[in-house]
Image: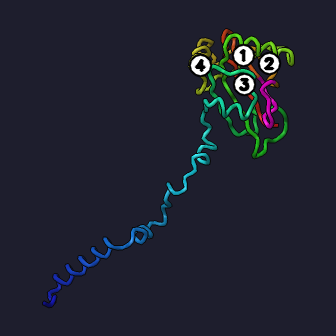
Amino acid sequence: MQFTEPRVQLLVCVFALFLAACFSPEDARLEGNSLRPNVNTNFNSNAANANANTTEDDEKELDKLINLPFTPEETVWRNDKLIADADANDNRTPGPNDYKLTAVLKFSKEDAEALIAKAALKHPPTDTELETEAWFPAELIAKSETSGKSTIKGLSYSAETFAKAPYMVGSLVRITETEYFVLKLQTQ
């Protein structure tokens, strides 16, 4: 049986190419797509989240970074790269390993009183106002909205009790009429 008719020859060629494509190794079929890398290969979720500026609520992870003198009832925190602006407490330019840790901690009434008694020994409290951030607990955001300025009032204390290298500089603010504290520490 000879395939002399051009249409039959074309049909046989197309069928042969189809079979060759079906039985070739998978990698050979994907080699032509070198412009789009395989995004799922060796995905490192820690590297992807390093600059995501997400909040955390893991108290054990926070305790690895700072000293927690009492066990908080609620914990939410973030660890952000320190940028050269109002974040810095001094005039030095932040380096690539400089970070700012901000934590909102809620303690029991007894622990809150013990904490401020200890902190007041290091630094007398001063009145302050803080701007709320979108990730703060709902109770603090609602409290800030009543002021009409997106700020919350509190007393600022020394954060020395929480300091652990490299987070050595910062402040601790007890929010007025609550057991919430906003802790800000940065590398030095």
| Labels 1 and 3 touching (C-beta < 8 A) | no
Q: Is residue 45 above or below residue 134?
A: below
Real-space Cα separation, disc 1 to disc 3, in angstroms: 9 Å
> Which numbered circle lies on residue 157?
2
Amino acid type of the residue tagged 4 in the rendering:
Ile
Q: Earlier in the sequence, mark 2 or mark 3?
A: 2
Give the mark nearer the N terminus: 1 vs 3: 1
Label whose residue precedes the other's in the sequence (1 or 2): 2
Type of the residue with mark 3: Leu
Q: Residue at x 58, y 26 (%)?
A: 134
Quarter placement of the C terminus: top right
Q: Which residue is mark 4?
A: 141
Q: Position of residue 184 (x, y in %)?
A: 74, 27
Instruction: Identify the residue at horizontal 59%, vertical 27% (top origin).
Output: 135
Q: Secondary structure at mark 2?
A: strand
For residue 174, the mark is 1
